[in-house]
Image: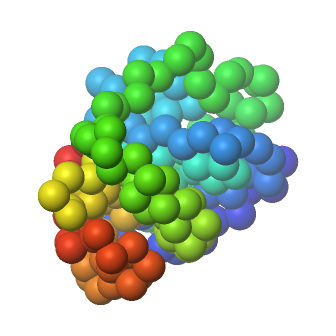
């Protein structure tokens, strides 16, 4: 099994591409070791010293390290954990995850559909290319609430991406959008 790695805009994060499906159309973000109960793969990666976050994307795994360890010592360990997981045939996710509720008024359903379409077709593919994801969390009073995951969570350029890229695009195509803000979950 050959696993490629790619850097991301976040220097503390690497993207691992195992050359096979990881989550399909879904994603899963594990911000702490305690949150990995439903993912044997994320738990195995978190068992390594220095791992701060694990994000599972369609065909990639993004790992964020803490400042106490260098990639040159952690990267081979992560590669080994991923390879061992897939070779053993273990599941990536077990059971169903709880989806966070969206804060949307019923009268905003049409606007929200436009926002989600733009996010799915124009934003999420680009963000996935950098090892992350962006999840719609709500729309109220003209403000779109989004949650950044994976490499995007904690990335120094995520605020600029959110404000200058995503907010400007949404305001251009959806006049009801006044602003975009990042939410924790």
Q: Residue at x 38, y 37 (%)?
A: 30
Q: Residue at x 80, y 47 (%)?
A: 20
Model colouring: rainbow
Count up the numbered dots.
0
In this view, the residue farthest toward the front is 107
Front-most of 105 and 130? 105
Q: Which percent across, then down, holds residue 12?
A: 35, 66
Q: Residue at x 68, y 22 (%)?
A: 91
Front-most of 78 and 125? 125
Q: Which percent across, then down, holds residue 180?
A: 24, 68
- The answer to whether 107 appears left or right of 88 in the picture is left
In the image, is residue 96 above or below residue 131?
above
| Any part of residue 181 in sight | yes
Q: Which residue is drawn at 44% across and 79% down?
A: 173
- The answer to whether 42 appears left or right of 104 in the picture is right
In the image, is residue 63 above or below residue 5?
above
| Any part of residue 51 in sight | no
């Amino acid at each position: 099994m050959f696993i490629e790695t790619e850097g991301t805009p976040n220097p503390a994060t690497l993207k691992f591409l195992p050359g096979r499906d990881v989550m399909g159309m879904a994603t899963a973000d594990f911000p702490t070791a305690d949150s990995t109960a439903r993912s044997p793969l994320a738990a195995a990666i978190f068992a390594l010293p220095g791992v701060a976050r694990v994000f599972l994307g369609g065909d990639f795994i993004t790992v964020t390290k803490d400042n106490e360890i260098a990639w040159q010592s952690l990267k081979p360990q992560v590669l080994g954990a991923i390879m061992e997981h897939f070779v053993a045939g273990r599941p990536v996710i077990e059971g169903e995850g709880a989806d966070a509720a969206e804060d949307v008024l019923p009268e905003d359903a049409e606007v929200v559909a436009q926002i989600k379409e733009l996010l799915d077709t124009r934003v999420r593919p680009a963000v996935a290319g950098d090892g992350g994801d962006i999840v719609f969390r709500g729309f109220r009073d003209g403000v779109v609430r989004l949650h950044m995951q994976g490499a995007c969570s904690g990335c120094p350029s995520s605020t600029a991406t959110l404000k200058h890229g995503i907010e400007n695009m949404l305001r251009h195509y959806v006049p009801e959008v006044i602003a975009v803000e990042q939410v924790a979950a």
